[in-house]
Image: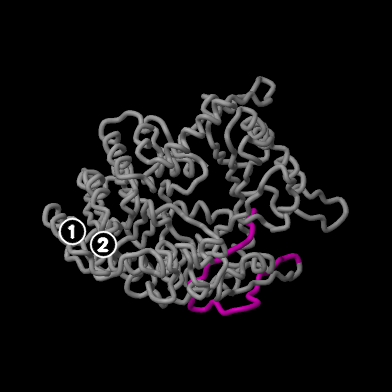
Amino acid sequence: MNHIKEALISLSPQSYSEVKVDWREFESGMPNIFIEEVHRLLPAHVLLLLNMRRLGHGQNRLSLLYAIPRYGCRSLTVLLPFFPTGTMERVDREGEVATASTLSRMISAVPMTPGGPARFLIFDIHALQIRFYFQDTILPVLLSAMPLLLNLLKTRIFEDWGKGAAVAVAFPDEGAKKRFGGFFEKVLFCSKVREGEKRVVRVAEGDPEGKHVFIVDDLCNTGGEAISTFVSPCSLMLNLYLLSAAAVLVACLSYAAIRSTSTDVSVWVIILSRRDALARRAAVRDLWRAASRENCRVSFQFLICQKPQPSLHLAAQLDEEREEFGDLEMLDCEEGYGKGRLVQKVLAGMKHFLSRSASSDFFMKVDDDSFVAWSRLCPRLRSIAPSYAYAGMPDMVNRTDWWFNNTESPNYDPWENWPYELYPFHMAGGPGYLISSELLRHVAVDFMTAPLSWNEDKAVGIAIHRANSSGLPVRYHYLHMDDGESEDPPYAGNWSDYPYLSQHQLSGESIRCLHRVEATGGNVDACYRHTKWLYELIQQQRHTGNDS
C-alpha cells in the first residue's frame, strides 16, 4: 500500500499528509501499537489504507480501526482493495465456515465518527451479496476497477497494436464470466473438466486464434487456474496478460501516465467572462499575468462573445480594454447562460485554441470568478503526461435533480439532450478543467456535436465520454479544487496549508487578495471578507463552533 500512499501525497501534498503507526510488539508477541502525532487526527478526515491479506495482521489492523474514531477524527474512510476471505462467503456443505461473514461482523464493530459511519471502499469483492453481511454501523462501498482496466486495454491496443487490432477477454471459469462478462463485448469462456486426476481447462466459447487475449479472473489465489488457461488451446493467442480484479487497481495506478516533474509544461487558458465585467477583469488580471513560472508557461485570454451587438458605450470600453491589455478575445458566439449558449461559447474557445499556430500541452477553461493557485497547479500539471488527459474536479450529479428539469432554472436541460439518470463522468466547469491538446482535437471536431447538454461542463463531459467510448485512451486526473457548492465552509488559515489548486465563486477583490497572499504568505481569512456569502458562512461556522 506504500505506493498508493506515496502517489496520493505526491499528487496532492496540500490535501494529504501521513500519520505514522508504529507496529511494535511486547516480548510475548502481543501487539503494542502506537499512533504517532495522534493529535493530528482530531480535526482531520482520515483515509486509512488497509492491507489485510496477511493472516497474522488481522488483530493489529482491527485494533487500529477501532481506535481511530475514538481519537476524534471528523470522518473515517478505509481503502480495502482486497477483501481477504477469498471465496468463503457461503457454505456448500456442513462443516464449512463462512469466514467472510465473520470478518464482516468484526469490521462492522468500528465505532461511529462525528461525520457518521466509517466508509469501506472495497474493489471487486468476490460476490456482491457479501454486502449484506455488513451491519448498518458502517457503509461498505463496493467499487469496480473494471472501467480502469478497460481504459488500460484501450491504451495498450491504441498505442501498441493500432486501433483495428483483434482483442478478446478470456474468463477461466463460469464464475468469472458471470461477475465481469457484462463489461466486455468479445469474450472467450473456458470451462473446467476432469480427466482422471487432472483438471483441464478447455475453451468452451469463442476463438482465441490470432487475437491478443487478456485473461480476467474474479479471484486469484495462486494463479494456477489462469496458468491452466494459458497452456490450454488458448495458447494459440499472440499475447497474454494475466489480470486479477484485485490487482487491477495497482496496475492502473502504476500505468497512470505520471511523468517526471522535471518536464516543462505549457497551458493555454480561456477565462469565461461577461462583456460588462470590466471591473472583475481589472481585479484578476494581475493573477493571470503572473501565472507563468519556471518550467510552466501559461498563456491566457478573457473570452467574450460578439452577439448581441453591444451598446456604443460598452463597445468603446471593450475596444479600449483590448488595445491596452491585448488579452480580451471576442469570438463569434452569443452571450448568455441558458439554452446551450455557454456551451457554444466554450466550443468557440476550443476551436480558437486549435486554430492558433503556437502549440500548448493543455487547454484550460475556467470562470473569471475563480482563483487559480498557479504555484501549486503548475507542479501538479508537470506530473501529468499530456496524452489524452482530462483533468479537474469530478462533478457527479443526478440528471433527475430539480435544477436540470425545471424550465425556470438557469440549468434547465431538456431530457432529449441526455435521456439518462446520470450524466457521464465529468469535471466541474467553474474552478476549471484541462484537456490535453491531443485529446481536444478529437473532442472539439468529432464529439462536441448535438445532442449535447445545455450545461457547459456536462456537455464537455458527454463529448469526452463519446471519445473514450470510441476507443481513444482518455486518462482522467483528479485535481483538488473547490467549486463553491459544498455545504462546508472553505479552508481558512495560513497559506502554507491552503489545500486548493483552484477556488470558485469569489469576488474580484478576494481573488486579488489571495494572489497577494500566495506571493507573500500569511493568512487567507481576510481575503474572504470581499465575498459576502462566503464570509458570512465562515462566521456562522465559527459562531456554531464557539457555542458547542
Q: Residue at x 57, y 73 (%)?
A: 234
Range covered by the magenta-colored residues: 197-221
422 lies above or below 40: below
At mark 1, the secondary structure is: helix
Identify the disc placed on residue 444. Answer: none
Residue 262 or residue 398, whichever sits in front: 398
To which residue does mark 2 refer? 304
Is-magenta flag for residue 447? no
Q: Nearer the viewer, residue 23 or 480?
A: 480
Q: Which residue is drawn at 42% across and 46% down?
A: 482
- Residue 318's label in the rendered image is 1
**Residue placed at 69% from the left, 52% from the top?**
86
Q: Position of residue 406 (x, y in %)?
A: 53, 65
Q: Position of residue 325 (x, y in %)?
A: 14, 52
Dots 1 and 2: beta carbons under 8 Å? yes
Quarter containing the C terminus: top right
Residue 313, by quadrant, is bottom left
Mark 1 or 2, nearer chain start: 2
Residue 448 visible? The answer is yes
Quarter of the image for residue 223 reads bottom right
**Label 1 crowd (10 A; few <14 / some 14-19 / many >=20):** many
The type of residue carrying mark 1 is Leu
Label 2 amino acid? Answer: Ile
Q: Disc 1 vs disc 2: which is toward the camera?
A: 1
